[in-house]
Amino acid sequence: MKRLSFALIVVLLRTLSVLPYKFVARLGMVVGTALYALPSRRKQIVQVNLRLCFPEKTSRERQKLARAHFRHVVRSYLERGIQWFGSAQSIQDIVQIESKIDLHDDTAPPTIFMGFHFVGIEVGCMLYSTHLPVASLYTRMSNTALCDLAKRQRGRFGAEMIERATSARKIVGLLRSGKPVMLAADMDQGVDNSVFVPFFGVPACTLTAVSRLAKLGRARVVPFVTEVLPNCQGYKLTIFEPLADFPSASDVVDAHRMNAFLEEQVVKFPEQYYWVHRRFKHRPPGMASVY
């Protein structure tokens, strides 16, 4: 049964990869709307996250935002077909890039590209890999076959895929060799190597990996965000200026700054942030679970 399910997923994604992009995008929005009408665990998680992070909004406003988010999430799943099986040109055709730094500067210091889990993060990373060498950290999925497929397809344009659990020594070696490393540290991965700092005023278990790797690799930290453009016009990858005075002497201060920067981006297009993730899965001692 697992083999059959995996085969069907591959067939579906390959089929979607050859269909017109706007058709796939619109289909995803329709399916997302339909799925939001059904009771689900993910729907409940989205609603809890939005209630915690946007208490000033009315219930009607949060429901509207949650519905829009479901549409974006499901759309992003269907667009994996283009991202995983489409050509480099097909990805370049749907992603604009705006960079505040010179991406071709041979004298640039070691660089960590710090991403965030907006629904477009994957296509932004893949677009970058069609132009320049990069290593990208990933988290292993429980489904081995699907994980191997994702790793292979995400790295098919030359990106070096590095499992998040690998040794810091290897990542530091890549940085010092001049290869940029892309990673995202805005999800709850457990209390080890994490600190609790506010995210929209709610204590969030936040990884300190960015600070530690930047210190070890003597690297600058450059944030990036991929935004879904309106009217099925594709995506925009924005690469920002390096964070000033980062890392600091304090992992807690750095984690505060990471979350503050992320908040600034989320409020621009809140429906595109990955609210289906249990961002507040772990809680500080004495605080009750919210899910």
Image: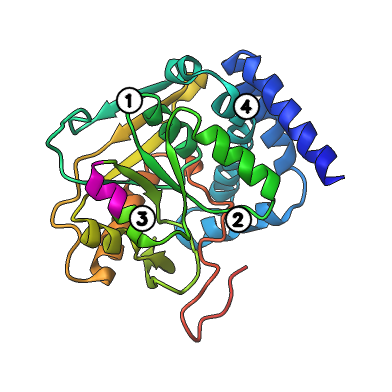
* Gap in angstroms between the C-alphas marked 3 and 2: 39 Å
In the picture, residue 289 is in which quadrant? bottom right
Q: Earlier in the sequence, mark 4 or mark 2?
A: 2
Q: Is residue 55 visible?
A: no
Do the CB atoms of the residues marked 4 and 3 lie less than 8 Å apart?
no
Which one is in front in this view, the residue at disc 3 or the one at disc 2? 3
The image shows residue 241 at horizontal and vertical percentages of 19, 41
Label 4, secondary structure: give it.
Answer: helix
Mark 4 = which residue?
81
Mark 2 = which residue?
47
The image shows residue 254 at horizontal and vertical percentages of 25, 63
Mark 1 = which residue?
97
Q: Which residues are magenta?
A: 173-178
Three-letter residue code for mark 1: Ile
* Gap in angstroms between the C-alphas marked 2 and 1: 32 Å
Number of other residues with Cα within 10 Å of mark 4, as a class: few under 14, some 14 to 19, many 20 or more = many
Which one is in front in this view, the residue at disc 3 or the one at disc 1? 3
Q: Earlier in the sequence, mark 2 or mark 1?
A: 2
Question: In this orientation, which residue lies closer to the viewer: 98 or 267?
Answer: 98
